[in-house]
Image (spheres, rainbow, N blue to C red):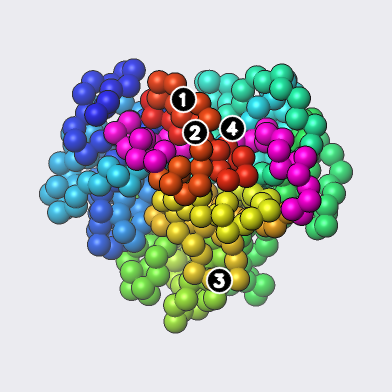
Amino acid sequence: MDSTVPGMTELGSDWRVVDGVAAAWFDAPSLREGAALAARVVALSAEIPVDVRASGVRVRLGSDEHAPAVSAAARELGLTADPAALQHLSVGFDSPDPGAVMPFWQRALDYAPTRDGDLADPLHRDPELRFRLSDDPRPLRNRVHLDVVRPASAVERAAGLGEPFGAFGVCHADADGNEVDLVPGDALDEQGRTADWQAVFSAIACYRVTSPAQQAEVAAAAAALADGAGYPLLVDLRPGYVVLDTGKDRWDADAHGLDLDFTGLAQRLQTAARELGATADPAAPRFVQLYFDAADVAAVRAFWVAALGYVHDRRTKLTDIVDPRQLNPVLAFQEIDVADTERRQQRNRIQVELAVPADLAQARVAAAVAAGGRVLDESVGRRRVADPEGNELVVVSV
């Protein structure tokens, strides 16, 4: 196992390096128990991002300083690490002039520049955008585009994207022709009973907190309420924030499949957060997903399910596939005209990048090939695989 990265010494067996970051996943039987570990983690450092799920907790570290203490806390709480659960998706753009397209995407998503010259979600919840120089001409439309949903007021402020077009009047294109559907969100409840929540495909409430102690209290209260309702809420702790999230569409009964009115739970979560002194940030919610055009949706979808370890959305009428731990973006698929052979043969300018631990990379590539993919090229720590219609997945393990 390669468990070193610049600035880190050897990590313990719980940890793997994923996308240059030390990461661990600890299985947990409930949100309450996951929130208990999260409280221990943020007490070590308010800068550590923690993702609490009904099935476990992901912790990501910028250095190895706190790895032993996090592992010890997990053991004390009876939680076991599962490195096989770790992966991280990002989106790669090929461009003849990356500097010309980056400002477009920065405005569309309200992302921040990174030290590597790419763009990242400031809360590190949605996928990073990576930009690479490429002079390969690709004049036709991609078969992959992004859907981005933000509060309506934030969409209105995203100036400089050009006139929207498309069937729903929400599509924009950058200088290279890469497309994004920038969709305005809405209030979760028209009666205003859940004013802290935004419906941005997911229902999300982002709360500002002033200390790790307050952060832990808000997360614990949310976990207790969600567990009590039997609802698999997503609870993300970020520096100065607690983010409560349903996952795509899962505030709707048809999507979550539970005997539950989520609006009522959202009211209780909102009340608890406010009573603990947290303040909602209505501009912060954001949802990002990837959309694929495919001539054979079933074949292309099967590839991505296998390659990413995703599962089908429970609603059979949809083509969505989702990360079972709700840590990575949703992928959706729609049918393309089978006669559009020229567009299907052209390489996309957008690729999916999948970072996995080094000891799991070969298994992921093998799964992708078994599901109809083919390896295009490989180098140290990097393998490029095409799905049955030529959409590319880059598996990175350094």
Question: According to the image, label 2 marks what residue?
Answer: 375
Relative height, residue 89 to residue 250 (above, below): above
Q: Is residue 346 magenta?
A: yes
Task: Calculate the distance from the C-alpha at mark 4 to the C-alpha at mark 3.
Answer: 30 Å
| Element at label 2 | strand
Along the viewing direction, whichever of 38 and 134 lies nearer the viewer: 134
Along the viewing direction, whichever of 142 and 75 lies nearer the viewer: 142
The residue under label 4 is which amino acid type? Gly
Q: Are marks 1 and 2 in contact (CB under 8 Å)?
A: yes
Task: Calculate the distance from the C-alpha at mark 4 to the C-alpha at mark 1.
Answer: 17 Å
Q: Are marks 4 and 2 in contact (CB under 8 Å)?
A: no
Part of the protein shown in magenta: 337-366
Along the viewing direction, whichever of 141 and 286 lies nearer the viewer: 141
* Residue 378 - label: 1
Report the residue at 39% width, 65% height from top: 232
In the image, taking residue 386 as reference, residue 336 lies left or right, namely right
